[in-house]
Amino acid sequence: MAMMKAAVFVEKNRIELVDKPIPDVGPNDALVKITTTTICGTDIHILKGEYPVKSGLTIGHEPVGIIEKLGSNVRGYQEGQRVIAGAICPSFTSYPSQDGFPSQDGAYLLDDDDTCPCHGYKATAGWRFGNMIDGTQAEYVLVPDAQANLAPIPDGLSDESVLMCPDIMSTGFKGAENANIKIGDMVAVFAQGPIGLCATAGARLLGASVIIAIDGNDDRLAIAKKMGADITLNFNQVDVVDEILKITAGRGVDASIEALGLQITFEQALRVLKPGGTLSSLGVYAEDLVIPVNAFAAGLGDHRINTALCPGGKERMRRLMSVVAADRFDFTALVTHEYQLDNIVEAYDLFANQRDGVLKIAIKP
């Protein structure tokens, strides 16, 4: 039996590199040889036990690679072709997919009986890699429903230039899309990690005239400027809520995007929002949220709070890669480190502890 290396979740605070069988390819699948993948903030939630997955599952959900083998039903692709697949790889056959929410593809995981959906659904079920099935931090990954999810990489684009597309770009842009941004809007983006930086870029693409980027790291705020921010605020130096209300002459921003997943940033994003504005929440929250009654205008402020899981599918990936190909922004600037798969445990330690100015790490099998 042919084997491959894979990074698996063992238990809380423990991920190990192990040998696993290379997956068999079903008729609707594709086996992709990973050339580059990365570690996501969500993987850190998994590592810390804040998001539950099964022990022994291969982690990771951002694949860039080469088609090794195609299932018999998959048409329009060739073995040896460079491709990506979204972190969300829906079947497009489920009820949620056909209801317009393919990221919530409808897998029912609240017990071990996969034949009976009546026991309840798990949100995020369109997110399969590293959540429901073996993921991408390995030498190979099996892509399900491949014809719906594989997206060919245009000639001339490097692995690093498209590495953000499967998740980070898709999530950040969805945050901007969910914020209902209109031309001329003022937008505040809380946290300028990789997703927040992509949300800033997305707000610029959608026509925001003033984008306020908030973070505690001046290096990230400098990158935010390159991603389209007009004003940057370091929360270590100013009261962010007071400053944004001054900037908007007390009116509040039209939209705010929360890209970290903490009570404090969620609350600040709500406090700076105008009546009738939209708060777009992208963070993965590890604890219950509290909505302050005064910031929420006792429920009478016509506020909208939208959450999102990044869209997937080959058309979403094609559109994101077209933004990369058009040189709208330099997304390679988000890739700050590179590690071999053999050293992925060391890479996790660096990323989890946010040392050495890390934003994203390219993992190379």
Image (tube, rainbow, N blue to C red):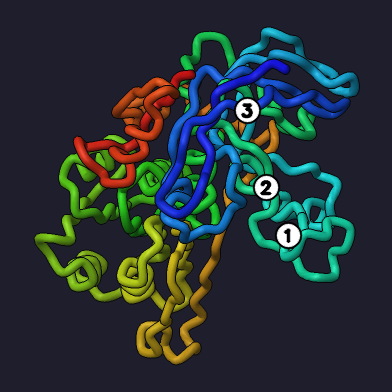
Q: Position of residue 71 (x, y in %)?
A: 84, 21
The secondary element bearing badge 3 is classed as: strand
Position above or below: 182 against 144: below
The amino acid on which the numbered mark 1 sits, given as a three-letter code, is Leu
- Pointer 1 or 3: first along the chain: 3
Q: Position of residue 230 (x, y in %)?
A: 25, 47
Residue at 71 percent across and 30 percent down: it is 143
The secondary element bearing badge 1 is classed as: loop
Q: Position of residue 43 (x, y in %)?
A: 47, 46
Residue at 28 percent across and 55 percent down: it is 212
The local crowd at label 3, few if under 14, some if 14 to 19, many if 20 or more residues have their Cα within 10 Å, is some
Q: Position of residue 81 (x, y in %)?
A: 67, 11
Residue situated in front as seen by the camera: 203 or 220: 220
Residue 74 occupies which quadrant of the picture? top right
Position above or below: 173 against 188: above
How far separated are the C-alphas under marks 2 and 3?
17 Å
Q: Nearer the viewer, mark 2 or mark 3?
A: 3
The amino acid on which the numbered mark 2 sits, given as a three-letter code, is Met
Residue 42 seen in the figure: yes
The local crowd at label 2, few if under 14, some if 14 to 19, many if 20 or more residues have their Cα within 10 Å, is some
Would you say the residues marked 1 and 2 are in contact, meaning their CB atoms lie under 8 Å apart? yes
Q: Which label number is shown at residue 271?
A: none
Residue situated in front as seen by the camera: 362 or 49: 49
Residue at 29 percent across and 28 percent down: it is 336
Residue named by callout 3: 20
